[in-house]
Amino acid sequence: MELQEFIKSYREAFGENAQLPLLFGYSDTAVADTAKIGGCFFKGLQTAREGTPVALSAEVIGCGGGKLYTGFSDMPERVPNFVSLTEKYKRTPEMVADYVKRLEMPRATKPYLNFVRMDQAESFEGFEGVMFYATPDVLSGLCGWAFYDTNEPDAVVARFGSGCSTVVSMTVVENSRGGHRCFMGLFDPSVRPWVGKDELSFTIPMSRFTEMMDTMHECFLFGSHAWEKVKSRL
């Protein structure tokens, strides 16, 4: 399925007012001249949601964790203590260090991480994943679609992590493996002020997204009574 065909199908399935997802991926060139973002870079992604692409880089991202989880830097020495002792998200600094190690996030080999709303992209080529900002009703549709063609127990997972790790790190690593897992995210209290109070993220690696596009019209999103009732209030 080509990009414009998917947009048409997505709006048919989720309604004409459905917010389009963001595509993200690394590149040698920036899609925009993005100013430095102090603190959490998700505050800057609102621009991409509104239709103006955003190009992140080591210079643009002001948060040390954000640079780490996008692959632009190694783990700063202060991260384990900060996440555990200051933010109180993990019981010990050692647990934080172990978590980061297990992520296996590779260092970025290209200088920019671009976020582009789907209707502003020309194709799916070069992107690592697709990020949806999802209300509970939209999330039910996305999860059900992901469950449709597989009985794998980890078809959709929700893991501990910052907003940037659950959206970027996990998706990038999964895509590099040709994996099938989709990720729910934005549970981190630090990222919550920068997203809607009724929104979570649902991120699909491109390795899985290409499969899911083939089953979209087969599943309940088209022609089922139950989904039509949900869709009517989207």
Image (spheres, rainbow, N blue to C red):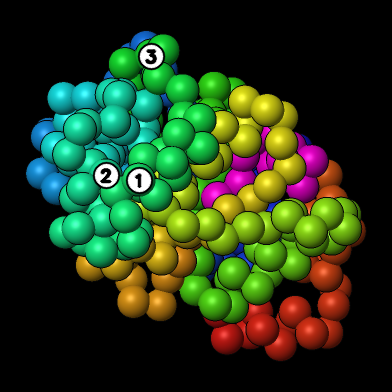
Q: Percent position (x, y) of residue 212?
A: 77, 47
Which structural element holds mark 1?
helix
Q: Given contact means CB atoms under 8 Å apart, are the residues at marks 1 and 3 in contact?
A: no
Residue occupied by mark 2: 80
Q: Is residue 69 above or below residue 143?
A: above
Q: Is residue 144 above or below residue 185?
A: below
Viewport quadrant of the C terminus = bottom right
Badge 2: residue crowd in 10 Å (few <14, some 14–19, many ≥20): many
Q: Which residues are magenta?
A: 203-212
Label 3 sits on what residue type? Lys
> Is residue 173 at all visible to an observer of this figure?
yes
Distance (Cα) linking label 2 and label 1:
7 Å
Residue occupied by mark 1: 94
Q: Is residue 164 above or below residue 109?
A: below
Q: Quadrant of residue 57?
A: top left
Q: Percent position (x, y) of residue 116?
A: 41, 38
Residue occupied by mark 3: 110
